[in-house]
Amino acid sequence: MNEQNRVAAFVDEHEWETELAYRVVDLQSEVGEIAAEVTTSTGYGSNPEDADIAADEIGDALFALLAVAESADVDASHALETAISKYERRIEETGDAGSGR
């Protein structure tokens, strides 16, 4: 995935390498910021149609996720293809993409 390579190059260029565990904590923080925006914009869920997320927050979360993939030595493109195949199989088998958990 070209985006993963861009994130890896950025991290390398700016000497921003860190342990995988810290990458995961950063990802959790970024996803939490998205959740906080939705929580606030919907009046704590009272108005779900008002959900709003700033594009840069999505970008931060994508960056963090791709940095996790890179740190974990996972090809993000391959991981995404695997997930899509899994969801397609579930839809074919059960009519629902969810895991049923």
Image (cartoon, helix red, strand yellow):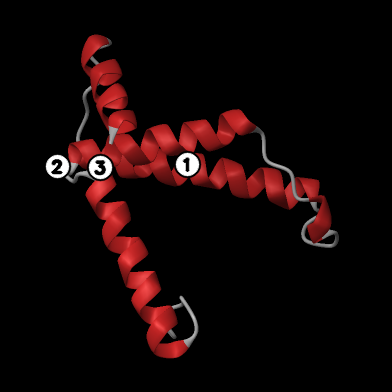
Q: Quadrant of the N terminus?
A: top left
Q: Nearer the viewer, mark 3 or mark 1?
A: 3
Q: Identify which amino acid the numbered label 1 is placed on.
A: Ser
In the image, 51: left or right of 101?
Answer: right
> Which class describes the residues within 10 Å of circle 3: few (<14), some (14-19), or many (20+)?
many
Check disc 2 and report its element: helix, strand or loop. Answer: loop
Q: Nearer the viewer, mark 2 or mark 1?
A: 2
Check disc 1 and report its element: helix, strand or loop. Answer: helix
Give the answer, above or below, for where 2 lies relative to 9. below
> Which one is earlier in the sequence, the residue at label 2 or at label 1?
1
> Which class describes the residues within 10 Å of circle 1: few (<14), some (14-19), or many (20+)?
some
What residue lies at 46% left-to-right and 77% top-to-bottom? 98
In the image, 27: left or right of 21?
Answer: right
- Visible residue check, residue 99: no
Q: Identify which amino acid the numbered label 2 is placed on.
A: Asp
**Residue topped by disc 3:** 69
> Which one is earlier in the sequence, the residue at label 3 or at label 1?
1
> Which class describes the residues within 10 Å of circle 2: few (<14), some (14-19), or many (20+)?
few
Residue occupying the far bottom of the picture? 94
**Residue topped by disc 1:** 29
Residue 66: where, in percent of width, then height? Answer: 32, 37
- How far, Cα to Cα, is label 3 from label 1? 16 Å
Q: Quadrant of the C terminus?
A: bottom left
Residue 35: where, in percent of width, then height? Answer: 61, 50
- How far, Cα to Cα, is label 3 from label 2? 6 Å
**Residue topped by disc 2:** 73
What residue lies at 19% left-to-right and 37% top-to-bottom? 71
